[in-house]
Amino acid sequence: MQHLSGIALIYKKLLAQGLTCIRGDRVLFRNVGFTLENGSLIYVLGENGSGKSSLLRILSGLLIPESGELFWDGKLIKPGDENYHSDLLYIGHLNGLKDDLTAAENLLMSARLSGYKVTAQTVLNALREIGVGRCSNLPVRVLSQGQKRRVALARLWLTESPLWILDEPFAALDATSVDVLVTRLNQHMVNGGMAIITTHQDVVINAQFTQNLRLDS
């Protein structure tokens, strides 16, 4: 199957400097920084409550940090930066699916909002890749948590975004689905993509360069 992201990606770089996140009167993390380039992977590590999901939301533009800056291709990322967000795919732990739409309708809507011209067959192929092709015409509300997670992750077969930010992508997946997702991430790395993920699963993703970014609770 030919994926949308099956071609090598042009050079990109994400630079984070001095990111600080405060919730209420508690500092979740302070002065976080890193550089991420093509073919590279960052594992965000830390105890529950250390701010892992908050960091990913900051990197995705869904949360404003107390302080710090983000740069994409050497340019400061500002709120609503279309150039950055067109290069970004974020999948949070809440999946971002509409319960009253079918699995296929959710993916078609998501792809088209991102500017990708996908067909119903392309969407069905993506759902089959992650093992939920039989659910394509079912409303999301009747799916199990594992099925919902796989529907959300099927976006990884429908994107041209070089930067993937994934919050616990392996949660609620069976062993077969974990293997399929690892293979997809490996392909993304080989194609010159980059990824930032949180996970409690012991998985090995092949990247040109891997960093562990640990947040202290």
Image: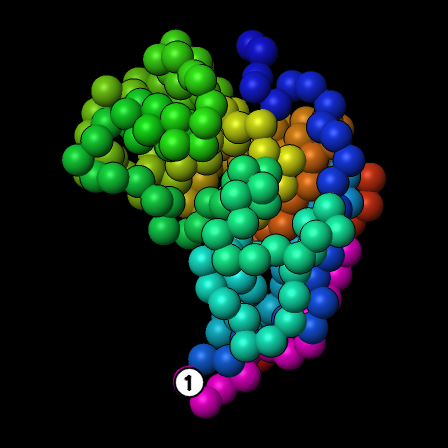
Q: Which residues, given as a range, are shown in magenta?
A: 24-36
Q: In which quarter of the image is residue 187?
A: top right
Above or below, comparing residue 44 to residue 143 in the picture: below
The answer to if 27 sits in the magenta stretch is yes
Counting from the top left corner in percent of width and height, residue 68 is at 64, 71
Residue sitting nearer the eye, 104 or 64: 64
* Left or right, residue 57 beside residue 39: left
Residue sitting nearer the eye, 210 or 84: 84
Rendered residue at 69%/19% (across/down): 7
Tell me the quarter of the image containing the C terminus: bottom right
Q: Residues within 10 Å of mark 1 (few under 14, many from 20)?
A: few
Say what amino acid the circle numbered 1 marks.
Gly
Rendered residue at 35%/24% (across/down): 108
Counting from the top left corner in percent of width and height, residue 50 is at 55, 74
Counting from the top left corner in percent of width and height, residue 143 is at 25, 35
Main secondary structure type of the part rendered in magenta = strand
Does the rendering let one see residue 45? yes
The answer to if 174 sits in the magenta stretch is no
Q: Residue furthest bottom?
A: 25
Dot 1 falls on a residue whose secondary structure is loop
Does the rendering let one see residue 132? no
Rendered residue at 44%/50% (across/down): 92
Q: Residue furthest right?
A: 208
Above or below, comparing residue 177 to residue 168 in the picture: above
* Left or right, residue 199 beside residue 210: left
Rendered residue at 63%/50% (across/down): 196
Tell me the quarter of the image containing the N terminus: top right
Q: Name the residue under label 1.
A: 24
Counting from the top left corner in percent of width and height, residue 70 is at 65, 60
Q: How many marks?
A: 1
Q: Quadrant of residue 114?
A: top left
